[in-house]
Amino acid sequence: MYKTVVIDDMFGISNILLEQHYRPDLDRFRSLHVYRGMSNSDFRIVSSLKRVCKSKSRNLEKMILSNFTKYALYEEPSIEGSVWRQMILGQHYGLPTRLLDWSFSPLTSLHFALSEHNLDKMDDHDCVVWRIDVNELHELLPEKYQRVMEKEGTTVFSLKMLQEACSGPEEYDEDMKDRAMLIVEPPSLEQRIINQYSFFGIIPSDMEDIERFLAEHTNRTVRYLIKKELRWQTRDLLDQLNISERTIYPGLDGLSKWIERHYYVKE
């Protein structure tokens, strides 16, 4: 069962940022939590593929990736031989995929929770940051995935480890069904991946309700509900900490988005 924590003051925000646990094996303070920010607390956790293609997701996924690869090869030739690379690159450019964005950085996730397409709506609703424990999730993985982790001496999957464990999405779906999912640290295919400290959850086709899965199979998942009264104050704090569209989306598009929001006039 996951826990909901209501954040109604700035001390609660600081608690999210200071979540570190002492690891005696390393004699360091490190936690393998990853975070996901969502701008409206009413939003459900769902992949972009499921949101766009709904019940036809399984059938349309191959066509989506095939067309993306056909036209994207000029920009990134390395994606031709790996369906996982196609998903990862496409995800960062808005392609509907089964991947779910997470970040190792709570600051990055707060940025997304405190972003709003229509800034007039910032005061209208609460937002949310989800936190999951990668170790806990990966304890649910089938045995052959566990063996790969043991061999590599890590609980964080790379693409190389994923490709060693399964041949592709079809085998992954058969292995996971709706009882497990894997978190992968992507290769640095694009500067946004680096800046956002990105991780991805690979959602099996049979997993229809991700939040129910987290409720039934995890005990260390936390849903931080940030009250709407804190959104502007926390948003301005992130800007002071240099966490903004300018750094999250490097390039002129991110710069323009940051300037637009920075000079927004509240009524």
Image: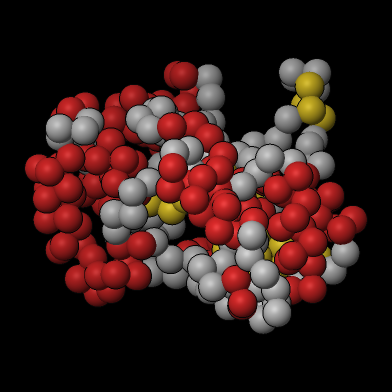
Does residue 212 appear anywhere in the picture?
A: no
Quarter where residue 41 is shown: bottom right
Q: Residue at x 49, y 50 (%)?
A: 256
Say which of 75 and 153 sits in front: 75
Q: x%, y% of residue 258?
A: 57, 51
Question: How many numbered marks are there?
Answer: 0
Q: Position of residue 45 (x, y in %)?
A: 49, 66
Residue sitting nearer the eye, 211 or 242:
242
Q: Residue at x 35, y 30 (%)?
A: 189
Q: Quadrant of the N terminus?
A: bottom right
Residue 44 % position (x, y): 51, 72
Q: Which quadrant of the figure has residue 128?
A: bottom right
Colour scheme used in the picture? Answer: secondary structure
Q: Is residue 208 visible?
A: yes
| Residue 47, above or below 245 | below
Please state, as top left, top right, bottom left or bottom right, where the C terminus lies in the image.
bottom right
